[in-house]
Structures are given as structure tokens and as C-alpha cells.
Image (tube, rainbow, N blue to C red):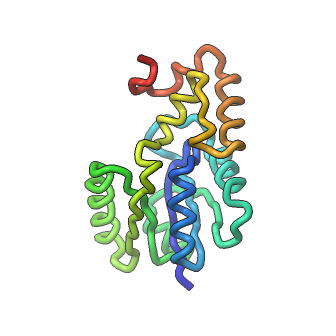
């Protein structure tokens, strides 16, 4: 059985992530979407909230499992008996970062390989931070995320009130 792990923060899970996962599961027997518990960046949703949203998104595909993880991804792969790490590449700068990470992971665990999927054209601009920023400013994210994620974003920013946009690092969408 070929098992692959697709790690990420998934804050929030969006159509770019979903596309990569669906394409990956066509090639492997099982895909574990591993939600990183303690990312080195501020997140909008708790680890369990992110895991729950991802699990709901993939609930109809029994070959996609969703878990939380922390620590080194190669150690997690060994723990769950996975042979591959799945990554997505949007733009050239992603390649440089992923290339370095793949080399470091290979140095740590030579038996774990990395498989990178080139994003579908319609998702090249899509990042979690873009989704969070648009949602924080009351924009329509229905073309970027599934309805359950859109509802969770709306609810979270309603909870944050006027401070919502201040909780999200912004790019230039406010201008």
C-alpha cells in the first residue's frame, strides 16, 4: 500500500488544497491530510477547528484521512508508515522553498520521498492569507473555499468584530 502525507497549516483549507489532495489520491492508495498543530505563524483557527474543517471537506472520500501532527514531517511519516510527502507548487518561489525542504527531509530520512504537484492554473493566486484577508474585509470567498469554510470564516470574523481585519496580516487588497 502506498500512503502519502499532505502536510499543511490549512488556515483555512481552500480549493487549491482540495485540488492537490484529489489529484494526489488518484495516484496513491491513501492520503493523510496532516494539519500542523503549531505553525510558526499566527492562525485564525485553532488546530482542532482546522482539522475539523478539513475533515468535513474530505468526508466523502474514504481514502483521504485527516489528522493533526506536530514535529518533523519525516518523523510523522515514519509514525504512520507513509512513503511520500505531497506538496503543491503555485509559483516559482514555491519551488525554491519546497526544493530546499525536500533536500533537508531527504537528509533526515532518505526513504521518504517528496512528490510535488503543480497547481491548477485557476488556483495559482490562492493562499490561505489571501482568503483570510478577503473574508476579514467582508468580501465574497465563495469561489475560493467550500461553503462550510466560508461559513466558518464569516462566523470567526463576526466573533472578532471590528478587530477582525486587524488580526489578519494584509497585503494590498485594502487599497
User: Which residue is farthest top?
Assistant: 162
Residue 2, how many percent across, how many down? 53, 81
Residue 157, how many percent across, how many down? 65, 25
Residue 163, how many percent across, how many down? 58, 16
Q: Nearer the viewer, residue 49 or 59?
A: 59
Residue 132, how many percent across, how many down? 54, 33
User: Which residue is farthest bottom?
Assistant: 1
Question: Looking at the image, is 151 positioned above or below residue 4?
Answer: above
Q: Is residue 30 left or right of residue 101?
A: right
Q: Nearer the viewer, residue 123 or 171?
A: 123
Q: Nearer the viewer, residue 41 or 60?
A: 60
Q: Which quarter shows the N terminus?
A: bottom right
Q: Quadrant of residue 117?
A: bottom left
Q: Is residue 99 left or right of residue 22?
A: left
Residue under the image location 52 percent in, 67 percent down: 23
Question: Looking at the image, is 104 positioned above or below residue 35?
Answer: below
Q: Which quarter shows the C terminus?
A: top left
Question: Looking at the image, is 108 positioned above or below residue 167?
Answer: below
Residue under the image location 54 percent in, 77 percent down: 28
Residue under the image location 66 percent in, 37 percent down: 150
Question: Looking at the image, is 2 positioned above or below residue 87?
Answer: below
Amino acid at each position: 500500500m502506498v500512503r502519502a502525507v499532505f502536510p499543511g497549516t490549512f488556515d483555512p483549507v481552500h480549493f487549491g488544497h482540495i485540488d492537490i489532495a484529489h489529484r494526489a489520491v488518484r495516484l496513491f492508495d491513501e492520503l493523510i491530510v496532516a494539519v500542523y498543530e503549531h505553525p510558526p505563524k499566527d492562525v485564525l483557527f485553532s488546530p482542532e477547528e482546522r482539522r475539523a474543517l478539513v475533515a468535513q471537506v474530505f468526508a466523502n472520500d474514504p481514502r483521504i484521512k485527516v489528522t493533526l501532527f506536530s514535529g518533523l514531517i519525516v518523523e510523522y511519516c515514519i509514525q504512520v508508515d507513509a512513503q511520500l510527502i505531497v506538496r503543491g507548487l503555485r509559483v516559482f518561489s514555491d519551488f525554491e522553498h519546497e526544493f530546499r525542504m525536500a533536500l533537508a527531509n531527504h537528509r533526515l530520512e532518505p526513504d521518504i520521498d517528496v512528490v510535488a504537484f503543480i497547481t491548477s492554473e485557476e488556483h495559482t493566486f490562492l493562499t490561505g492569507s489571501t482568503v483570510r484577508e478577503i473574508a476579514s474585509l467582508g468580501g465574497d470567498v465563495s469561489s475560493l473555499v467550500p461553503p462550510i469554510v466560508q461559513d466558518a470564516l464569516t462566523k470567526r470574523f463576526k466573533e472578532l468584530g471590528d478587530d477582525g481585519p486587524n488580526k489578519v496580516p494584509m497585503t494590498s487588497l485594502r487599497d
